[in-house]
Image (tube, rainbow, N blue to C red):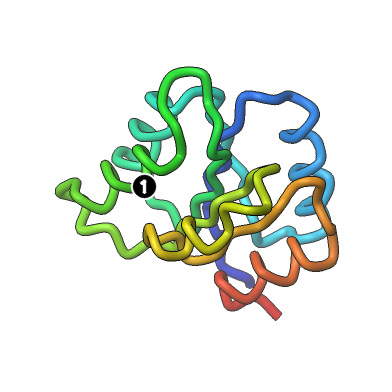
C-alpha cells in the first residue's frame, strides 16, 4: 500500500486550483488540500501533517514570500518543501534565494509540474 502524501495548495484563483487538481489526479498517493487565502494556508500548514506546500505568490491578504517567512520562523520547525507557483517568471531567482524549494511558473507545464511534485515527494 502506498503512503498518502498531503499537499497543500494555497491559491485564490479557482481556475488555477482546477489545473493543479487535474495535474495531480493521476497520483493516487497525493491528497490535495486547498486554501484560498494566505491566512487559511498558514493555519492549515501549522495544524496539518503536510509533505509539500505549493504557494501562489499573489494572494489577496498576504503574499507568498510573507507566508514562506512566517512558516520558516514558526514553531513548526519547518522542513516541508515549499514551491512557489507564480505567473511572475522574472522572480524565479528571487524566489529561490528567499528559500523556496522550487519556483514554478504559470501557465503550467503539466509534465514538469508533476515531475517536480513526484520528485519532492519521492513518488515513483
Q: Residue at x 57, y 52 (%)?
A: 91
85 vs 101, left or right, is right
90 vs 40, left or right, is right
- View extreme (left): residue: 75
Measured as percent of width and height from the top left, residue 26 is found at 83, 58
Tell me if mark 1 has few (under 14), some (14-19) or many (20+) residues whose alpha carbon lies within 10 angstroms of its own: many
Of 40 and 47, the residue lying toward us: 40
Measured as percent of width and height from the top left, residue 5 is found at 55, 59
- View extreme (top): residue: 60
Q: Residue at x 76, y 53 (%)?
A: 24
Indicate the quadrant containing the C terminus: top left, top right, bottom left or bottom right: bottom right
Above or below for 39 versus 18:
above
Q: Determine the secondary structure under disc 1.
A: helix
Of 84 and 40, the residue lying toward us: 84
Measured as percent of width and height from the top left, residue 47 is found at 31, 38
19 vs 6, left or right, is right
**Circle 1 sits on which residue?**
68
Above or below for 115 versus 37:
below
Q: Residue at x 38, y 24 (%)?
A: 39
Measured as percent of width and height from the top left, residue 114 is found at 75, 64
Q: Residue at x 55, y 51 (%)?
A: 84
Indicate the quadrant containing the N terminus: top left, top right, bottom left or bottom right: bottom right
Amino acid at each position: 500500500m502506498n503512503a498518502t502524501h498531503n499537499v497543500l495548495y494555497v491559491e485564490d484563483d479557482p481556475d488555477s486550483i482546477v489545473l493543479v487538481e487535474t495535474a495531480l489526479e493521476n497520483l493516487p498517493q497525493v491528497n490535495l488540500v486547498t486554501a484560498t487565502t494566505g491566512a487559511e494556508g498558514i493555519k492549515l500548514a501549522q495544524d496539518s501533517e503536510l509533505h509539500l506546500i505549493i504557494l501562489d505568490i499573489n494572494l489577496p491578504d498576504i503574499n507568498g514570500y510573507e507566508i514562506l517567512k512566517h512558516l520558516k520562523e514558526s514553531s513548526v520547525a519547518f522542513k516541508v518543501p515549499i514551491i512557489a507557483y507564480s505567473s511572475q517568471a522574472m522572480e524565479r531567482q528571487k524566489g529561490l534565494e528567499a528559500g523556496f524549494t522550487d519556483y514554478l511558473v504559470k501557465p503550467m507545464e503539466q509534465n514538469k509540474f508533476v515531475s517536480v511534485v513526484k520528485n519532492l515527494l519521492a513518488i515513483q
